Image (cartoon, helix red, strand yellow):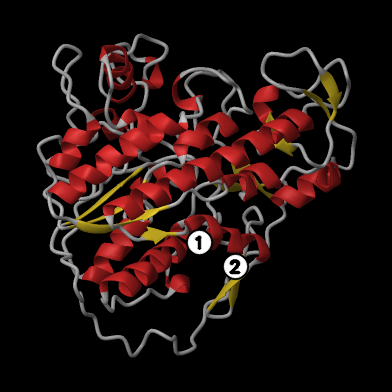
Amino acid sequence: MRKLVYFVLSIVILTITSCMKTDFDNFEKSSGTADFSNYIAVGNSFTQGFQDGGLHNEFGQQQNSYPSIIAQQMGTNFVQPLVSGTGSGYMHLEYRNGEIVVIKNYDHKINNNDPQAIDYDPTYATWGDKTIKYNNLGVGGLNVRNIIARNTTEALEYHIYLGTSAPAPLAWNGVAGGPISSYGRFLDFGTISNRIEYIEHVKNSNATFFTNWLGINDAMGWAKSGGDAKSGAAALTDASEFREKYDTLLDVFQNMGAQGVCATIFDFTESPLFTTITLEAVDKDIWIKEGADTTIIRKAVPEDLMLLSALSLIKEGVGLTVGNPLPHQHVLDKDEKIIVKNHINILNNEIRLSANAHGFPVVDMYNFMNGLTSGMVFDGVNYSTKFIEGGAYSLDGLHPNSRGNAIIANEFIRVINENYKSSLRPVAVNEYRGIIFPN
């Protein structure tokens, strides 16, 4: 166990900053054949600027979302629905007994929160001015299937998820009448009887240029819940429904004459959330419950992926005996891993086919983000998928930190330049904040 704690919580603080002349110094900005005057970003939490398990902006975390960085390089106005104070609450680091530990954000559903857990800011309860026209339309938790409904049942389900009328305790923070997800409150989804769908906000955007990084949640929600085949955000989106709605979204942009790029889903099973807690790190036999609906209990094998959430349970003794196995929600077992990896590839094929049919270039984030597994170097600093030490991911082990967003923005910029003959200047990654360490 001591080895596990050391592996996860020992930190090599990245204080290296390069004073070298970068490769970007000779760029002269040009829009080429593109019109960046009204750039709109659609996506989920990765687009919205989510970090550390929450939406916060105390050190410019949300402000430095990858689309905001792209817009800065375009030289165009880009309005985001920024939160105040601690925002929705988030994870952070503290010194404890000579070690650095990760403190989870405050959870109103439990009664044993850490005394230093960060709760949501009081302003977050009313966050989001629905009268403002935003350029960043990223909404945490948004699936492609949520953007438009095919029938009344779907319309009601998606409205309760994003708009209003969820009963307690399903609603955000357990408040009856609110949405299940709080991250879309800056958009007007109407009322339960007069609903407005996400696609309507895209139609009203009058975009001249867009980036589209939707699709991640259509596979990730299932994987994050340990392959639990329940309804709602954790379901795997059917490929035919995904393609139908993805086509509809691109039809909207095409009909308004917008230019833009689409991005593929990255292999999030290679992120620290899924790869940090290994049998080698634990150095013990771990017993797991296999699958969501089985009674099979077996020893974990290296091909099983234990989520970061399993760490606290293992420290309490869960998983160390056959009579007390790790719950399936904290393990993506070897068969489920194959299912989700295949589903990512299936959805990525639909993204490429849809984008090609509409004449929009594709940013291959699948292959690009896989580069972090073997390691990337920017201005002399190494980045990888190692938890905290890798430098690109935030404390939730899934979303990028500000430096990670800069890395992503540069890849979008590269593909935009390549396809629209523009010369947007990449950013110096190391000028952005990484993990924030306690004083």
Looking at the rendered structure, the secondary structure element under dot 1 is loop
Looking at the rendered structure, the secondary structure element under dot 2 is loop
- For mark 2, does the 10 Å Cα neighbourhood hold few (<14), some (14 to 19), or many (20 or more) residues? some
Reading the image, the residue beneath label 2 is: 14
Residue 1 to residue 182: above or below: below
Mark linked to residue 13? none
- Given the current orientation, which residue lies at the most extreme front position? 357
Residue at left 44%, top 86%? Answer: 22
Residue 363 falls left or right of residue 184:
right
Does residue 64 appear anywhere in the picture? no
Q: Are marks 1 and 2 in contact (CB under 8 Å)?
A: yes
- Report which quarter residue 297 is drawn in: top right
**Front residue of this view, candidates 344 and 109:** 344
**The N terminus lies in which quarter of the figure?**
top right
Reading the image, the residue beneath label 1 is: 434
Residue 278 falls left or right of residue 151:
right
Label 1 is placed on what type of residue?
A: Gly
Label 2 is placed on what type of residue?
A: Leu
> Residue 201 appears at what percent x and percent y?
17, 37
Residue 394 falls left or right of residue 169:
right
Does residue 55 appear anywhere in the picture? yes
- For mark 1, does the 10 Å Cα neighbourhood hold few (<14), some (14 to 19), or many (20 or more) residues? many
**Front residue of this view, candidates 51 and 69:** 69
Indicate which disc, 1 or 2, sits on the residue closer to the N terminus: 2
**Front residue of this view, candidates 264 and 122:** 264
Residue at left 24%, top 34%? Answer: 127
Residue at left 83%, top 42%? Answer: 279
> Residue 96 appears at what percent x and percent y?
67, 45
